[in-house]
Image (cartoon, rainbow, N blue to C red):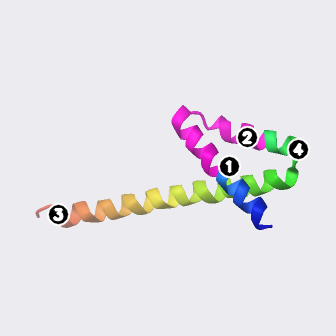
């Protein structure tokens, strides 16, 4: 259901941003717990969005690190 995925993803984005701003990743789990109390379907969609977004962030950070290492080695004189 598109509405479910859209709502869950928007909430996941907001929860990740709140966790970053507050420096507390527990908020992500707490939001999931609140969802689970009323809709396990919404909770699963939210958790899926969380996993996808956090995995993408880790992969992007890895890629940026790899590219910056290459740039440094290319600009370092021998």
Which residue is disc 4 drawn over?
A: 38
Segment tinted magenta in the rendering: 11-33
**What is the spatial separation of the Cα atoms under label 1 and label 3, in whole angstroms?**
42 Å
Q: Which mark is residue 75?
A: 3
Q: Which residue is mark 2?
A: 31
Question: Quadrant of residue 3 in the image?
Answer: bottom right
Q: Along the horizontal axis of the image, is 14 left or right of 67?
A: right
**Residue 77 in the image, given as x and y percentages of width and height:** 11, 62
Question: How would you rate the neighbour count of disc 1 (Cα within 10 Å): few for under 14, some for 14-19, many for 20 or more?
Answer: some
| Quarter of the image where one finds residue 45 | bottom right
Disc 2 from disc 1: Cα separation: 9 Å
Sequence order check, earlier mark of 2 and 4? 2
Residue visible at 87% across and 51% down in the picture: 40
> Foreground: 12 or 50?
12
* Lower sequence index among marks 3 and 2: 2
The residues bearing labels 2 and 4 have C-alpha atoms spaced at a distance of 12 Å
In front here: 37 or 56? 37
Classify the position of the C terminus by image quarter: bottom left
Q: Residue at x 39, y 60 (%)?
A: 64
Q: Which one is in front in this view, the residue at disc 3 or the one at disc 4? A: 4
């Amino acid at each position: 259901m598109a509405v479910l995925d859209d709502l869950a993803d928007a909430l996941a984005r907001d929860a990740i941003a709140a966790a970053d701003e507050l420096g507390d990743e527990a908020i992500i789990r707490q939001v999931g717990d609140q969802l689970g109390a009323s809709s396990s379907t919404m909770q699963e969609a939210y958790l899926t969005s969380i996993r996808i977004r956090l995995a993408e962030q880790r992969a992007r950070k890895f890629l940026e690190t790899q590219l910056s290492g290459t740039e440094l080695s290319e600009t370092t004189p021998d």
